[in-house]
Amino acid sequence: MKKEQSPNKINHYYINNLFNIMDKTAVDNSNIIETNNDACQCKLYAIERGYWTDPYLKTLAGSTHNERRTPEISLGYYVRVHGLRYLIEKFIKLTNNDCQIINLGCGFDTTVFYLLDNVNLHFKHFIDIDFDEITEIKSSKIHRIPHLRNKFPMNNQSLKIPGGFHSSLYTILPVDLRNLTQLDNQLKILSNNNIIDYKKPTLFISECVLIYMSNEHSLNLLKYLSQTFSQCCLFLNFEQINMNDRFGQIMFENLKQRSCYLIGMDACQSVNTQYERYINGNFMSAYCITLNEYYKKYLNLNEKQRIEMIDGGLDEKELLEQLFEHYCFSWAYRDEINLGLDKIKFE
């Protein structure tokens, strides 16, 4: 059971500061795109402080100065990255490296570089998808910067993707995920060129993407993916949860005052609403845990002690728990080939 927090104990000024950094979005695409910059700056600060290592993000994000962040922010991003990578690795190992990965709303995420640097993890193809404003920048940097470009084998048969990138292992596609016709057309190009296989085990990654879409758009996206990759697919999601309490309302109102709207919030009210969205999206089964549950049950104790001391310890454990109770990992699958996707879980 979730421990109820008393509203009068909430430090509203501090929470507003947290949400100014952790989440920004809007109906306007430019504000949705800006969430990528916010996330990158938070991650870069945490990386510089030693929470985890990432030799690629600074090059992609193009920032040399990172404003100081609170320990709660850095811990939140550490848990986000650490938890997602754990499940990604479990999926790859379960498929014996015979899988494809599609990163939805990727921003400047560096998961593909992380996997390529791990000699024990392989995949058939990795696809990053985002608005063309993002994909043009990411593709251009990979083309121009040798230590990025050299990660990806190129040949004369590489597709020319306007606003994107293609190599034998990695593709960047410019797509508005609310436009399923556009998404379908782009994926068909890859399928027709034998780059992806709709029947191959496929992992979809989504980080704080669905909540910024209308419930209709996100449900249609889930239905499209579960139908198109119906033989074997796993949808892995990180986003908000428990938005129906006082803390969630503060988050919502704080963003609304800056003309930012969590328009998909109805699916983020509880574990049950998360489940319902997946089942309505024609997935077979679903799981969901809050960051609190992950942090307390599954994160190694020594590692937890290490990261909590990086910035001198936590002044307010209660605030961290409140924050972590409002974010979650959720995942759902279709497994017609009985690969064993029910085994994908934290241990």
Image (cartoon, helix red, strand yellow):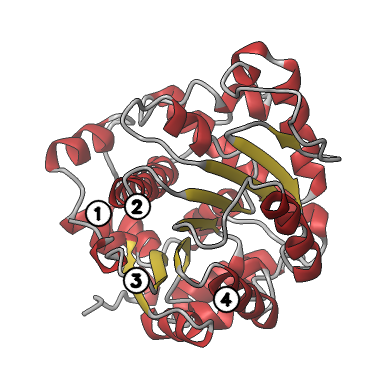
Amino acid on which the number 2 mark rests in the picture? Phe
Q: Earlier in the sequence, mark 3 or mark 2?
A: 2
Q: CA distance from mark 4 to mark 3?
A: 22 Å
Q: Residues within 10 Å of mark 3 (few under 14, many from 20)?
A: many
Sort mark 1 into few (<14), some (14-19) or many (20+) by Cα contacts within 10 Å: some
Which percent across, then down, holds residue 100? 50, 49
To which residue does mark 4 refer?
Answer: 227
- The answer to whether 321 is drawn above or below residue 299 in the figure is below
Real-space CA distance between mark 2 and mark 1, rounded to the nearest whole angstrom = 21 Å
In three-dimensional space, the C-alpha distance between marks 3 and 2, rounded to whole angstroms, equals 16 Å
**Which residue is disc 3 drawn over?**
288
Verify CB contact (< 8 Å) between mark 3 and mark 2: no
Q: Sequence order check: which comes first, mark 3 or mark 1?
A: 3
> In this rendering, would 57 be left or right of 5?
right
Residue at left offset 56%, top offset 52%:
102
Going from the N terminus, do you reach mark 4 or mark 1 first? Answer: 4
For marks 2 and 1 on the same chain, the one whose residue lies earlier in the sequence? 2
User: The N terminus is located in which quarter?
Assistant: bottom left
Q: Nearer the viewer, residue 156 or 130?
A: 156
Residues tagged 4 and 2 counted as in contact (Cβ below 8 A): no
Q: Nearer the viewer, residue 195 or 314?
A: 195
Q: Is residue 68 visible?
A: no
Please state which amino acid type lies under the numbered disc 1: Tyr
In the drawing, does residue 300 fall left or right of residue 163? left
Element at label 4: helix
Q: Position of residue 89 (x, y in %)?
A: 33, 45
Which residue: 46% across, 26% down?
A: 54
